[in-house]
């Protein structure tokens, strides 16, 4: 039976809150002209509240498909993806839209800023659809761009544009922050600034954060490191000495 949207249970008030995400036997198959391509081949994984998870793996290993399912951008072919006990695949498209709007902050490799709007105006667009947003000025200050708020994207460096994208994601105060190769188009120095913005936001708002990268060095900032290969979880490692972004050596 297809569910309608209902508010998700709050981890802070539930006596025994479920894990933020639980996936069971998650499979995703795409049909192409050349035949079926299996992106996920049965993923069982649990992500807890407040965790900072780094996902590693080569291109085509399934990590971006997995992230898209967690974010409600895609649905599995088989298996379950549960958010606080709610099966995302059973929701209507309208309910998934509300889920993305109210629960998720996305940061992608490419910034996707609107060129005709200033940094502050780009962030304001996300704030307008949130129920309890930060002010755009607060979000930009959190990523260190309070002095660049009136600049257009063309007047900002690549790293600054990506930090605007981070501010746009966090202005909603999302419960979940999903980052897909956020430093993939940046040099190491600029990438560190972006990672610092993401980790700072994660810490301030206690978000559950999942960050995808192909760069193994970045794994040091996570609580757990999950490696994907051939559509499956290959290894899971707990970071006993989590590092800050500026301690990374690329």
Image: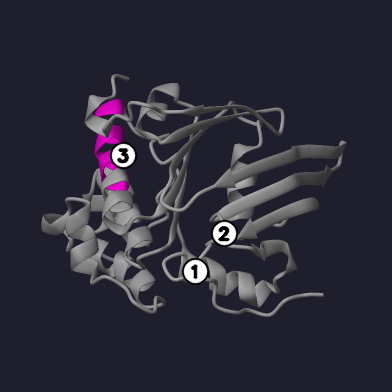
Q: Are marks 3 and 2 in contact (CB under 8 Å)?
A: no
Q: Are marks 1 and 2 in contact (CB under 8 Å)?
A: yes
Q: Quadrant of residue 97?
A: bottom right
Secondary structure found at label 1: loop
Secondary structure found at label 3: helix
Give the image location of residue 193, x and y in percent.
24, 38
Residue placed under numbered mark 1 in the picture: 14
Residue range in magenta is: 188-198
The residue closer to the viewer here, 180 or 157, is 180
Residue farthest to the top? 249
Residue at the location (24% across, 59% down)?
A: 152
Whether residue 76 appears in this view of the structure is no
Residue placed under numbered mark 2 in the picture: 18
Residue at the location (70% across, 74% down)?
A: 92
Give the image location of residue 72, x and y in percent.
61, 60
Residue placed under numbered mark 3 in the picture: 195
| Cα distance between the residues tagged 3 and 1 | 31 Å
Residue at the location (20% across, 55% down)?
A: 142
Density class for disc 1 (Cα within 10 Å; few <14, some 14-19, many ≥20) is few
Marks 3 and 1, the one that precedes in the sequence: 1
Placement of 90 over or under 191, stated as above or below: below
Whether residue 29 appears in this view of the structure is yes
């Amino acid at each position: 039976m297809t569910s309608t949207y209902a508010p998700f249970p709050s981890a802070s008030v539930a006596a025994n809150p479920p894990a933020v995400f639980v996936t069971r036997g998650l499979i995703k198959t795409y049909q192409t002209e050349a035949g079926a391509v299996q992106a996920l081949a049965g993923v069982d994984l649990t992500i807890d509240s407040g965790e900072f998870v780094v996902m590693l793996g080569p291109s085509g290993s399934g990590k971006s498909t997995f992230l898209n399912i967690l974010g409600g951008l895609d649905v599995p072919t088989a298996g379950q993806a549960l958010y606080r006990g709610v099966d995302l695949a059973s929701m209507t498209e309208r309910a998934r839209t509300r889920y993305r709007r109210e629960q998720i902050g996305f940061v992608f490799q490419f910034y996707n800023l609107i060129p005709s709007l200033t940094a502050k105006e780009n962030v304001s667009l996300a704030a307008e659809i949130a129920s309890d947003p930060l002010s755009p000025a607060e979000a930009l200050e959190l990523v260190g761009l309070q002095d660049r708020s009136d600049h257009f994207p063309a007047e900002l460096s690549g790293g600054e544009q990506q930090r605007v994208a981070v501010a746009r994601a966090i202005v909603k105060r999302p419960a979940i922050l999903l980052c897909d190769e956020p430093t993939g188009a940046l040099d190491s120095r600029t990438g560190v600034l972006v990672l610092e913005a993401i980790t700072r936001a994660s810490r301030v708002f206690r978000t559950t954060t999942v960050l995808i990268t192909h760069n193994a060095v970045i794994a040091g900032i996570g609580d757990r490191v999950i490696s994907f290969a051939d559509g499956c979880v290959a290894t899971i490692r707990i970071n006993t000495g989590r590092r800050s972004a500026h301690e990374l050596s690329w």
